[in-house]
Each structure stands twice: as C-alpha cells, then as structure tokens.
Amino acid sequence: MRRYPSPHASTISFGPGPLSPAIKGLIGANVVMFLLQTLLPALTLWLGLVPAVVVEGLRVWQLATYMFLHANIAHLLFNMLALWMFGTELERIWGTRYFVKFYFVTGVGAAILTVLFSTLPFGFGEQLQQAIVIGASGAIYGLLLAFGLYFPDRHILFALIFPIPAKYFVMIIGAIAFYSSLGPSGGVASATHLGGLVVGYVYLRGARFRPGAEVKYRYLKWKMSRVRRKFDVHSGGRANDWNRRIH
C-alpha cells in the first residue's frame, strides 16, 4: 500500500507549475472532443453516458467516453483547471503510468456507480435512467480525494475566498455531493461526483479490500518463520552463539 508523504508546506499558492505529460495529454483530448461536439452535436447522444442504455447492454463504451465531453466552455474550463491544479502534483508523485490508471479507474468507476444508482427505486434513480451524463468530474473528484489524502494540510480556497485545509475541503464537497444526489433535482451530476470520491478512496485504500493479498502475505510470513525455526536462526545469530557475539 502506498504511503502518503506529509506536505512540506501549507502556504497558499495558485497553481502547481507547468503541465505534466498526462495532464497535457488529457487536456488536449478534452479540448479536441469539445470542438468535435460543437461541430457534431450528435456525438453527445452517442458518447455521453445514458444509464438506461448501458443497463440494456448497448453502447457500453459510454462508461469511458462520457469523460471527454462537456456541456459548454465554462464546464470544460472549470474541469481542466481542476485537473491541472490537483492532478499535476499527483502525477509527479505517482508517475505518469499510475496517474493515468487512477484517472480512468475513478472516471469509469464513477460511471458504473452512476448506472447502479439509476437502478435504485427512488426519485433520483428514475431521474438518472434517461439522463445524459457528460464531463470529467467523476475522475476530477477522484483526484481531489487523492489530493486531500496526500496533502491534508495544504490550503485550498473554498469558493475562491476562504482558505481551508484540503482534508476539510474534500469532506465538505463529499457531503454536498451526497446530499445533492438524494435530492429531486441536481442528482445527475452529484451522483457521478460522489461515485468518483468513493471509487478513489476504495482504490487508494485497496490493500484493505484484497483478502488474497493478505492471505499471501500471511503465508509467506509463516513460511519464513518456519525456516528460521528449522535452522535455529535468531536475530543476531544462533541460540548457542551468545558468548561469541559479546565484544
């Protein structure tokens, strides 16, 4: 399981610096897709996430393609700004390969949870079934959760005014997403946001949810202990070697 490095500073600053490779590629892909959306509006219906369609086994690719579509320029700019601000430092820590993997796991995972939410016998479930969900927010919320775990005391401007530690910022937006997903309106986007937070947390804490890995670890530990007993190996030497180790 990965260890979270403690933050070196809690000062407030704007932006993490130059674009890292994965961030640059993701922003480029989102911008290209937005331009294609503008020219071909039918792409939104074809690539946007429609839970009812996915449940029927049709257009399962929507679980991934919805992340590269946006409703308008403001939606695109906000998500890409958040991707840059919260994703750049994570990519530097993780490396590009792990960062891209985490991005898609949280984005697709958020879509799967959104589809599952749509099957629930409640008002917001029915609302989700025929909705068209688009945007990178599921993966962005996963990155925000990771940022809060890695840099819990790094200050973030809440509502661009009030500086609060990242750990509390994540708690607040998580609570807002959860509450909004239960409401009769606004639950479409909030369900995906909540899904990104949940998937991100489970993925980062994944060692606790992998019993096979734990069993393998216990078996290897038992095997090593058995070998030590067989050869009478102790920390510092054999049991009858005490006098020779005194200097």
Image: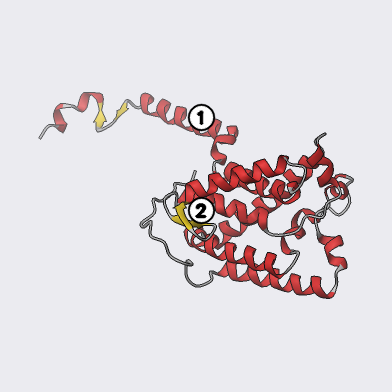
Q: Amino acid at mark 1?
A: Tyr
Label 1 – label 2 distance at C-alpha: 34 Å
User: Residue 231: x, y in percent?
Assistant: 35, 27
Q: Secondary structure at mark 2?
A: helix
Q: Amino acid at mark 2?
A: Phe
- Of badges 1 and 2, nearer the viewer stands 2
Against 18, is 247 above or below?
above
Side of 39 where 227 appears, left or right: left
Q: Which residue is mark 1?
A: 219
User: Residue 242: x, y in percent?
Assistant: 18, 27
Colouring convention used in this rendered image of the protein: secondary structure
Q: Residue 194 or 58: which is nearer the viewer?
A: 194
Q: Secondary structure at mark 1?
A: helix
Identify the residue at image location x=54%, y=39%: 207
Identify the residue at image location x=48%, y=47%: 167
Looking at marks 1 and 2 on the same chain, the residue that comes earlier in the sequence is marked by 2
Identify the residue at image location x=87%, y=47%: 52
Q: Which residue is mark 2?
A: 147
- Please state the total of marks drawn on the protein image: 2
Q: Quadrant of the C terminus?
A: top left
Quarter assignment of residue 76: bottom right
Q: Residue 218 or 191: which is nearer the viewer?
A: 191
Quarter assignment of residue 118: top right
On residue 235, the disc is none
Q: Residue 145 or 238: which is nearer the viewer?
A: 145
Side of 115 where 170 appears, left or right: left
